[in-house]
Image (tube, rainbow, N blue to C red):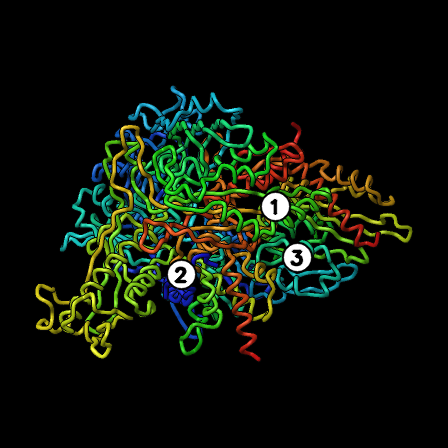
Amino acid sequence: MISQAPNTRYVARKRRTQEDKRFVTGRGVFVQDIERPGMLHVAALPCPYPRARINNIDFSAALAMPGVHAVLDGAELAAATNPLYGGLKTPGVKWRPLAFELSRYAGEWVAAVAADSRAIAEDAMELIEVDYTPTDPVIDPEEAYQAGSPQVHPEHGSNVLYDGEFTWGPVDDDFAAADHSLSFRARWHRSSTVPIETFGAVAEWDEGKGILDVWASIQMPNYADQIAGAMGIPLNAVRVHQDVDVGGSYGVKRGIKHTVLIGYLSRKLERPIRLIEDRLDNMGGGDAHGPDRIFDTQVAYNADGMIKSLKIRALDDAGAYPGRGPFQLGKPIAAIVGPYTINSVHYEAISVTTNKTGQVPVRGFGQAPTNYMLERAVDKVAAALGMDRIEIRRRNFIQPDQFPYEQPSGTKYDSGNYPAVMDKVLALANFDALCARRDEIRSEGRLAGIGVATCLEPGGGNNMFEYLMNPAAEITTFMEGAEARIDGEGCITGVMATTTSGQGHETLVATILGEELGREPDDIRVIHADTLTAMPTRSPVASRMAIMLGGAITGAAAKLKAQIMAIAAHNLETPLDQLEYSGGDVSVRNDPSRKLTWNEICYIAHKQYHRLPEGAAPGLQAQHVWQVPLGGQLPDADGKVQLYPCFSFQAHIPLVEIDPGTGKVTLLEYFIAHDCGTVINPDIVRGMILGGIAHGIGAALYEKFEYAPDGQFLSATFADYLMPSTFEVPLVKDTEHCTPSPLTSHGQKGSGEGGYLGGPAAVASAVNDALSPRGLEIDQLPMRMSLIEELLNGTP
Amino acid sequence: MKPAPFDYFAAASADDAVRLLAEHGDEALILAGGQSLVPMMNMRLARPSVLIDINDCDEMKFMAADGDGFAIGAGTRQKDILKSAETCTAVPLLLKALAFVGHVQTRNRGTLGGSIAHGDPSAEMPLVAVTLDAAISLRTSNGERTIAASEFYSGPMSTERAPDECLMAVSFPLSTGAGTGFHEVSERHGDFAIVSAAAEINLDAGGKCASAAIGIGGAHPHPVKALKAEAILVGEAPSDALIEAAAEAATDGIEAMDDVHATGAYRMRVARVLAARAISDALAEAGL
Amino acid sequence: MKPRSITLTVNGAKRTAAAEPRVTLLDFLRGPLGVTGAHMGCEHGVCGACSVLVEGEPVRACLMFAVQAAGKAVTTVEGLAGSDGEPSPLQEAFRDAHGLQCGYCTPGMLIAAQALLDENPDPDEADIREAIGGNICRCTGYVQIIEAIKLAAENLREAAQ
Ligand code: FES
Ligand code: FES
């Protein structure tokens, strides 16, 4: 239910999506469905050691195998391509598609085979002989931070990629003045989004045109730029086909190393080359792991429950190749105090490199771990004061009349009504009855707990965290472009500039175009331009597409409408202010008999130059590029800057039971209320929120990329990395609230990440509530049943 | 992730299968439901050069009483066992265990014999066979032999089956009026157990345990029959203390392993918890 | 090993192509036969994205070799639509309830759900969970999938009356 239903025809109405039809009939076109004539298949050889010097690679036997066309090693590739993009200023850290001289984690690719089939490529791979000298790895992030630990990138000189301190507000004063303080360590272990479709790409070099065509399961900003940069070819020599359906991403589909590898092979062999990760590639050598973080946090608070200040040290293990991963320490600055009126914050962010697979952006871009830590802090203060967990949140909430609210790090939250959303979730959960149910389970001698967690979801993106962590990157736009056209027969086409991976962007564009032009969205075609024809984009990251693509397409629609109105005014010989637009037809306000229909206007625009107003170009087409709201500024003298424009809010309430004999956690209920402003398509938003919660349940209870102390990778299969199935996810009950954003075209905010930002914190809160009668507490995720059982029954 | 090359023969009959096995020696493996073998082949952890497919051997798909046992052909699919009322009455423990086995899609292909022969230490079917001490019949081109399930397993995925032997059938003792219990724990429903416990108990007219079969899976390198726990129960009148004592003894001799899912210590503790639950269920069902 | 000729019925049509014994049914469908509805998610039997019906029963196509399917009838998601090519009631229900996002697990989900509805016209939530328990979806959190299957069952029951 939308509390403030906007006066709209299509926006916010329950409607089928455009995309679903092709998927339910098996007609999606994913990268694995792309066939090119003469295409070769690649398999990559993983290094068995966490860290090893590569002395020699003998691939003569592999190359001699029938059906094998090329074997490539790191030396050849390094000589022919540039290192891959790294976000930080760390020139000594060189990331390459194939290890060169030194292999830095178990599973890193050291050679690749191109053959007639993947099976033959795998057969040949087994014949490659690599002479390694294994050396001591560094696996533990704390150890990596110490000087003198084995260096992952000797050229860099240490394992510390980034170590920065920020102070916003009078932290020391606030700590000194506060009644109490507490400190704790929270551990977010390594997991990721692990889409069911692995990453894959096809590259085809056209020597005649000098163009590299790429089809890929991709979701990342500046993909083409990074391919061109690594291959040393002009950006306009790379054409990424963005109409490939992407089988889930949630941040991680960033196979830049895969693409450069096959781009090089394609150019060398003049054949289309395909590399589809198998699941082992994906989990081990795919460089697609997520944050792996240790928080040491101090909280200053008063006896009345008001939290005054935070000191946070976040140490993140970026693995061997950081790429853009370390910036996941920067984005949480956007909501560093959550929805609370905390006055000051000290934040130390440290990124270290270790001998593990590389880190990429994961849903929420670092916000999920940070929110988990923050909500643990609030629960701990409540416990220390003997205060109710809901009451303490209410007291600390930023109030509805305080928006726009500038939090200590300089970001202004656009809008919100946190108490109202909290009320809604409590009503939905029938909270008193839920507590009674928990208490009844407890009275039967079992363990049960209710979780309480909130989260802010920064949406819209804004690259300023990059500048904060690397001032050489003076990048102040995070724009999105779109195009809309109406043909001579009146058919509308929306052109988006990037890929989509389940978020329903085609529906988004069609819905907004339909709304703005008063035309049926189902009749609007939405296409994905390739990177040579697309408007500027920053891709569907950062919970930004409803905001940014929505804004861009709204702008294009407004331009189109202006063209239509100008044609009508000219032909009806009536001033604009006396015309009325309705469903595409334009009539004179006081004389409806004088009217031009949609089809007439489109015909005139395309065919009748003599009826166009002076100076008007023939046709109906408009482009619009939207700069992110409130973006574009460098930090002020105090280092404060706006990070992200829009802030959605959620409140989560799960009920769990723990089997005290086995430690197994069962989610009995899960309630959520969310506010992401105006919802463009209710089913899509609901789906992303519910899916995010399931993903969060996975991070909270099951999912972990496990490394042995010696650096061997232990979670390479779906039998070891455990994603929730339908048995582990309850029928989540949801409700919504709508506080429109004043900054966006229709009041919309982001919604793709929040479920995952609040879910882990909520489940952790519930498990700890269940453990609390035994005086136990657990401050790490995932809370595997063996961990919980050990806590309950192990010998201390 | 593509299997290494192999040659493939579809056996038309059990005789055909053992003949092919004799011909191709230890390079060959029997392909039954493929739900355990094919993943290992896809990852090239198993690389037979010959596969002998027994899916078309209809004579290996049967469920029938045979003396004081109930025999199930090795090729019988798990889904068919679940649907067989006769089997459920004859070997109720099997039914309880099957509720934890895989998913619809895997049970549609997976066979009893495949699971028994594969011998994953945490798989349910081997645990039931060991607990009940089923008789496993193996055939070569030269003849057939029977081995007790409690002697069949020697380690993780290793059994007493000789390379040229084909597992033909498993005969479970008929459950007459016994109560059964099966408990296991895994992170996700349908996964292999981290630990599991099975129990089948008969009470005599006086309410004492006339017989008891207890087994533990997932902890030791292979499923283990908990003889000591059985001995504690038999001849005694059940009580909470007795159940606890039996459960305590259920891990006797077990050397539990650490892995990515849990520590050995976890497995030992939880094996006892699950054993107690399985015994309680069995007693309750036996009419206590 | 030499490729051998394999003939099977896919979505009602007889199809023949050559493949080595090591080619899985999944790769055979997607490669030589060009029937790409079933998806590769793990190739070790956990995710269910490759689910197809063999002789009407859902199985994991990554765990069966194509040679084993010779002579059998295989149905993939493409075969669920009616003879007029229009989406089936189940497919329509997935659209109505938005029981998907990226669409990658969807073919497997639909196959599992179809097999359920073929056997049980009135499944409850537990039946549905059991039926799709071997299919992992990373996008939806399953709620809208369960709603879609309930809706399909309802619609089918109504239509049958
Ligand atoms: S691809 Fe077959 S189960 Fe995952
Ligand atoms: S819809 Fe994307 S994995 Fe299920």
Classify the position of the C terminus of chain A by image quarter.
top right
The reply to whether dot 2 and dot 3 touch (C-beta < 8 Å) is no
Image location (x, y in percent) of residue B273 = 71, 41
Q: Are marks 3 and 1 on the same chain?
A: no
**Label 1 neighbourhood size at 10 Å, few (<14), some (14-19), many (20+)?**
many
Tell me the distance, in whole angstroms, between the alpha carbons under discs 3 and 1.
Answer: 56 Å
Q: Is residue A294 above or below residue A254?
A: above
Name the residue tied to disc 3: B143
Q: Please give the label number shown on residue A12.
A: 2
Amino acid type indicated by mark 1: Val
Mark 3 is on which residue type?
Answer: Gly
Q: Are marks 2 and 3 on the same chain?
A: no
**Image disc number at residue A656:** 1
**Which label number is shown at residue A151?**
none
Q: CA distance from mark 2 to mark 1?
A: 33 Å
The location of residue A107, given as percent across then percent down, is 40, 39
The picture quadrant where one finds residue A261 is top left
Q: Is residue A281 visible?
A: no
- Of residues A149 and A366, the one drawn nearer to the viewer in this rendering: A366
User: Is residue A217 in sight in this rendering?
Assistant: yes
- Please, which chain is the residue tagged with disc 1 on? A
Residue situated in front as seen by the camera: A251 or B276: A251
**How many numbered dots are placed on residues in this image?**
3
* Residue at the image position 46 percent from the left and 37 percent from the top: A340
Residue placed at 49% from the left, 28% from the top?
A: A299
